[in-house]
Amino acid sequence: MRSFACALVRACAYALVVASVTLSTGCVEQFVIKRPPARPFDAVIVPGCPSEEDGALSLCQISRAVAATILWERGEARYFITSGAAVHSRYVEAEALAAGMAALGVPADRIYLEPNALHTDENMYNSLRIARALGLHTVAVVSSRGHAAFACRMLLDWGQACGAFAVDLDAVKARHLAVHERIDALRTPAEVEWLPLDERERRLAARTGRPKRPPSFLVYPWLGYLRLNGERWTPYTPPIPPRVTWSMRAKQLGLAVQ
């Protein structure tokens, strides 16, 4: 059986090939949604990015929260799954996104939280498990164009068709000008026992008995290599998918849902 290290060398060699094939075959375009869907998606995954150091929503989080809210207003999504742990700051990304969306008008009981993911593959895999546990069948991702399509390609590996909603930056900027007072002051509680990413991954590996996760710049070419060989990567994931809405979580935290 090939060792991980040997196969990884080959994976890196394949990375440039995979990237060139992706670009030349328009892999991104096959996922991007270019016109309003005929029916709303059952679930739209909103992958996380870090909060500011003081807990304020970052520009990245605001852009995704606003874009998701626009999908809700257009009737293009039934539920949302915000995804992300407190990865690079003390604030849980899923909670920050949910708070922003709720402040903009998305019903808090329509937003489910995935608070464990540390990387994009975990965002997608964990969120997919939540969607399936809830009986939600059609799935999309909202993020920057390339990131949303990349995330959809991961979902396809696990048997889930996916549409990629690209964030419309002009629409986000226009909306933010009108609503910034509602979201700029938002804060979600910091994790008291927060640990840096490397330490969290070390402890996760010890607890699960799996090898410590390699850096993403190695994992993602590895995914492409596995795909070429008909294999699939399974990320670390909690044994039971959480089914907690922002309405439920905000009540636990003692926060008023706007």
Image (cartoon, rainbow, N blue to C red):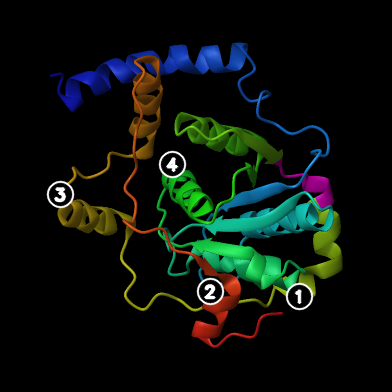
For label 3, the residue is 209
For label 4, the residue is 121
Disc 1: CA contacts within 10 A as few (<14), some (14-19) or many (>=20): few
Residue, x 25% and y 58% (percent of image)? 199
Gap in angstroms between the C-alphas marked 3 and 1: 44 Å
* Image coords of residue 230 (percent x, y): 36, 18
Q: Does the magenta stretch include residue 239?
A: no
For label 2, the residue is 54
Q: Give the residue type that dot 2 points to.
A: Asp
Q: Say if mark 2 contacts mark 1, CB within 8 Å.
A: no
Secondary structure state at the residue bearing disc 3: loop
Q: Which of marks 4 and 2 is in front?
A: 4
Tell which of 190 and 236 is nearer to you: 236
Q: Nearer the viewer, mark 3 or mark 1?
A: 3
Q: Quadrant of residue 152?
A: top right
Confirm whether residue 67 shows in the render: yes
Secondary structure state at the residue bearing disc 2: loop
Gap in angstroms between the C-alphas marked 1 and 4: 31 Å
